[in-house]
Amino acid sequence: MIAKLAFSFVFLLVLMVGVVSADTLFERFEFGDNEFVDVQRFQWIAQTFTIGSTGPNENFNLTKVGLKIYRQGIPGDGIVSIREVDWLGRPTGPDLASTIFDANSLIPDGAGVWTNISIGPVVLEQDKHYALVLGTSAGTGSQYIGWRERRGLTPLYLGGHEFISSDGGGSWPIEASDRSLMFRIYGISGPIPLEDGNFGNVNITEELRVGKDIYSIGGFFEFLGSLTSRIRNIFVEEVDAITINTEKLKVDNMSVCLEDGTNCPISEERNKFVFLSNFDDYEYSEMNYAPISGQSYFREVERPSQNIMPIDCVFRKLSAFVWENECNVESSIKLKSNFESTGIEITIPPGWMGRFSDVGEYVVKEGDLVNYEFTTGNNCNLRLMSISSMCNQL
């Protein structure tokens, strides 16, 4: 609750200086579809595009995409992302932005319906080539998302091609150069207005590593590729690997669940976490772990690129909230830099459901690698709701 209130405080401060702008249609191919391609759990589809090919050629903040799609059966969650492309024009690397939507609610009309999906914000640059990727969490066989396209006829979209992946977005060996998918790319120039699910302007890029078996609003899905996020001036989602009882797991991006600043439900059968942080113009920072269901001992795996502090910062508070605690033992949470031997630490007494403590002034420098450690008794089964720290820029 404290972390949530702190987040709300910063949100209101930035909201006062937000500038409201209307969405602009920057890039598109939207006429002449005569076929469809099916998007399934393992068969993901991408349309590459070039900024300035059919619309304004300028840098802009992505806000949503439009897809002419429909559903067949129950395809599960739809997964939309933006990626860069390699020297051959194929989708590559982690996601620049991604989102999840309920594909089961799409209209089952084979002609397709234009559907707007919010995504971003992330800055797309003039003249640059990108990939718009669509996948599903569960669709197989006759359960799929149909994405309308123009096939075998001219004119086609000249700013890119259709690509097909058979491993859920991991690789893109098939280029369908005789096809163009129906798509629209929307964004706004200048500052991004702050509203529900929109956390401000992009200022720092941060790569995320993700794996599979994540609980989302729509249910379980498996994702075998990689995602990225951008640090906004208020909010960022980060996820990475953790070690639980010597077993290394990777977890997926939960940005949809976290867009309102709250935690998502998490599976009781799986051990997962998501890490949140923000650095904003008001010298405020918050780091937070979403729900974790686990046993005994776990600690964050060191991430040389992800955990490096982007600023000089002084930590003054550290907090934790336990959702379920069946243990009659004391637990502890430590935050420390790789250049320090001690760090800061708080204890959670047996049965304690929340803890928020002043920890003096613990200074970390730009470039320091910062990690959390959480320990509890052997064979202790608890559910840690969040770990938070608050830091002021020096």
Image (spheres, rainbow, N blue to C red):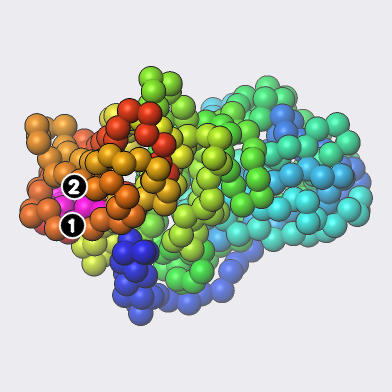
Residue displayed at 62% across by 24% down: 171
Residue matched to label 2:
346
Mark 2 and mark 1 in contact? Answer it, CB < 8 Å. yes
Residue at the top extreme of this rendering: 246
Label number found at residue 357: 1
The answer to whether 288 appears left or right of 43 in the picture is left
Quadrant housing residue 344: top left
Is 314 a magenta residue? yes
Q: Secondary structure at mark 2?
A: strand
Residue nearer the viewer, 156 or 315: 315
Q: Secondary structure at mark 1?
A: strand
Residue displayed at 48% across by 77% down: 20
The answer to whether 341 appears left or right of 353 in the picture is left
Q: Is residue 182 visible?
A: yes
Residue displayed at 39% across by 46% down: 325
The answer to whether 322 appears left or right of 197 in the picture is left
Question: Compared with residue 288, is residue 63 higher up or lower down, i.e. above or below?
Answer: below
